[in-house]
């Protein structure tokens, strides 16, 4: 999905449900009179006050502009000689500010930014430092890659909070981050590397590592060479239809012909699916071993790099081959194990699976993965979650981390009425994270709208992890 579409996906959640119920504290300096005076301060006065703020990371305020519902503050950051990071901050008028600060995630390779100013909260967004050529399509330089991966988000947050405090006369009461895909990873990076930045984080279908996509593309080519054959697009569709038909015998009716509730492979499931496949498509009988190997983990030089395919999920490559940004010009057929290990070597750009400090300060995370997501596969997201909570009992894990596995959910595209991606966006995650942080109300079940039917998929968090369906 394009970066601006993912960014809009995160921003659009605010339109689904309002966040209410917490009144803004009185700004420093007193009551209604001082608040009114702050609201009536001229843009020129605000500009003078804000331009005096000292920004970290080579920061410079480039624009202060009055908007219909508040103030826009644009600033750039240059933590390294090659860096050029753009940030946009939208500030509600002082007397209307609810005391909340929201960091908003980007998408894809980012490179674009926008201003959100709703007259209620403070919002900040960054292009992650990839707006300039040659970094627009992928951050090939190692320092730009670090800006993109985690540095830009942290410096955006730190500097935006300084501007917020200068404008309102006080720091935010609570800080939240909301993002999907690349933005989902931004949130997890913040929790793991800079736990003091945010109180609550919503991480949707996060792209936690590039190893999966790179290694799956490589493995596809290896299987082609090994077996001397592959599947045509028509055959892939026929395989998926047969897999769906097999699970329609046991899955609830709302999933029939649309998606599979639990597509994680077991021997019994694979045996049943293959019997269905060859019964419907006798011409594929010679492809059994090739098909079964798709479900095995991707191994590179004896190391596990990615989980295998899930049943009922498309298994063609739908995304740009990513290795060139790490190891130079390559295509899928000339990639080697050494190339893949070069991706893995970039360990300092992926989120560490240690949220101990974030948990200790009372931080909360809502995260979900889509079982039909080809870009950010759910097994990789679930593995990160399991690594974080390893050694914790159920109650301890649930006290700060709510993880959801969503059947029928792809990477945000609307999907086809009879194809993958039936389940769409969640409803009201911004309100759920606020309620959890500020009122101690666990998010519980989350509802996801269907794309093509007036239905809602209701999903409970792990370890229960159940899905039911209701009508709108």
Image (cartoon, rainbow, N blue to C red):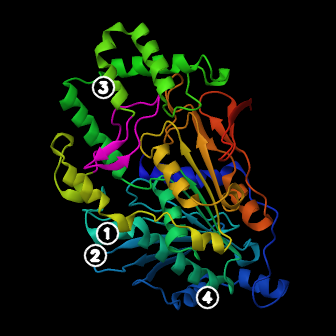
Q: Find residue 245 and report its horizontal and vertical position in percent.
A: 53, 16
* Disc 2: which residue: 82
Q: Find residue 408 and report its horizontal and vertical position in percent.
A: 56, 33
- Mark 4 or 3: in front is 3
Q: Do the residues labelled 1 and 2 touch (CB within 8 Å)?
A: yes
- Mark 4 or 1: in front is 1
Q: State how far apart marks 1 and 2 are (Cα).
A: 7 Å
Report helix, strand or loop for mark 1.
helix
Instruction: Choose the circle earlier in sequence order: 3 or 2.
Output: 2
The residue that appears at 79% across and 78% down in the rendered structure is: 25
Q: Residues within 10 Å of mark 1 (few under 14, many from 20)?
A: many
Tell me the magenta residue range: 296-322
* Residue 307 sits inside the magenta stretch: yes
Q: Find residue 373 and report its horizontal and vertical position in percent.
A: 47, 40
Q: State how far apart marks 4 and 3 are (Cα).
A: 69 Å
Q: Say above or below: 146 vs 1.
A: below
Q: Do the residues labelled 4 and 1 touch (CB within 8 Å)?
A: no
Instruction: Choose the circle earlier in sequence order: 2 or 4.
Output: 4
Left or right of residue 102, residue 63 in this image: left
Q: State how far apart marks 2 and 4 are (Cα).
A: 33 Å
Q: Are marks 1 and 3 in contact (CB under 8 Å)?
A: no
The residue that appears at 44% across and 13% down in the rendered structure is: 275
Q: State how far apart marks 4 and 1 are (Cα).
A: 36 Å
281 and 44: which is toward the camera:
281
187 and 354: which is toward the camera:
354
- Mark 2 or 4: in front is 2
Instruction: Choose the circle earlier in sequence order: 4 or 1.
Output: 4
* Disc 1: which residue: 144
Q: Find residue 290 and report its horizontal and vertical position in percent.
A: 30, 25
* Disc 4: which residue: 45
* Disc 3: which residue: 290
Instruction: Choose the circle earlier in sequence order: 4 or 3.
Output: 4
């Amino acid at each position: 999905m394009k970066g601006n579409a993912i960014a809009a996906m995160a921003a659009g959640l605010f339109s689904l449900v309002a966040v209410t119920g917490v009144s803004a504290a009185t700004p420093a300096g007193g009551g209604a009179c001082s608040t009114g005076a702050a609201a009536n301060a001229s843009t020129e006065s605000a500009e003078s006050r804000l331009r005096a703020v000292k920004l970290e990371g080579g920061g410079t305020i480039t624009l202060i502009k009055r908007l219909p519902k508040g103030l826009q503050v644009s600033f750039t950051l240059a933590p390294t000689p090659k860096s050029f990071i753009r940030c946009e901050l939208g500030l509600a008028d002082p007397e209307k500010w609810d005391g909340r600060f929201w960091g908003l995630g980007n998408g894809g390779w980012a490179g674009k930014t926008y201003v959100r100013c709703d007259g209620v909260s403070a919002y900040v967004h960054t292009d992650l430092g990839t707006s300039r050529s040659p970094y627009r399509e992928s951050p090939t330089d190692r320092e730009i890659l670090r800006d993109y991966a985690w540095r830009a988000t942290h410096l955006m947050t730190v500097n935006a909070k300084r501007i917020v405090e200068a404008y309102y006369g006080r720091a935010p009461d609570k800080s939240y981050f909301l993002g999907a895909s690349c933005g989902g990873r931004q949130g997890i990076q913040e929790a793991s590397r800079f736990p003091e930045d945010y109180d609550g984080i919503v991480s949707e279908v996060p792209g936690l590592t590039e190893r999966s996509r790179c290694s799956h593309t490589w493995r596809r080519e290896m299987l082609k060479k090994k077996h001397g054959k592959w599947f045509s697009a028509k055959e892939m569709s026929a395989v998926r239809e047969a897999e769906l038909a097999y699970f329609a015998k046991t899955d609830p009716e709302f999933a029939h012909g649309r998606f599979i509730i639990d597509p994680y492979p077991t021997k019994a499931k694979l045996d049943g699916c293959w019997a269905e496949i060859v019964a419907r498509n006798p011409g594929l009988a010679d492809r059994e071993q090739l098909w079964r190997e798709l479900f095995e983990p991707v191994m590179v030089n004896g190391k596990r790099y990615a989980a295998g395919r899930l049943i009922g999920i498309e298994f063609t490559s739908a995304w740009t081959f990513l290795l060139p940004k790490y190891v130079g010009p390559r295509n899928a057929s000339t990639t080697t194990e050494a190339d893949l290990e070069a991706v893995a070597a970039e360990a300092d750009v992926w989120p560490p699976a240690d949220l101990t400090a974030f948990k200790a300060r009372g931080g909360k995370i809502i995260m979900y993965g889509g079982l039909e997501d080809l870009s950010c596969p759910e097994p990789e997201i679930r593995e990160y979650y399991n690594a974080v909570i390893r050694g914790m009992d159920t109650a301890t894990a649930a006290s700060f981390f709510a993880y959801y596995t969503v059947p029928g959910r792809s990477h945000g595209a609307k999907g086809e009425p009879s194809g993958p991606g039936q389940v769409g966006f969640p409803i009201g995650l911004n309100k759920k994270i606020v309620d959890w942080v500020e009122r101690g109300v666990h998010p519980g079940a989350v509802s996801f709208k269907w794309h093509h039917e007036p239905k809602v998929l209701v999903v409970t968090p792990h370890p229960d992890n159940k899905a039911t369906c209701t009508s709108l």
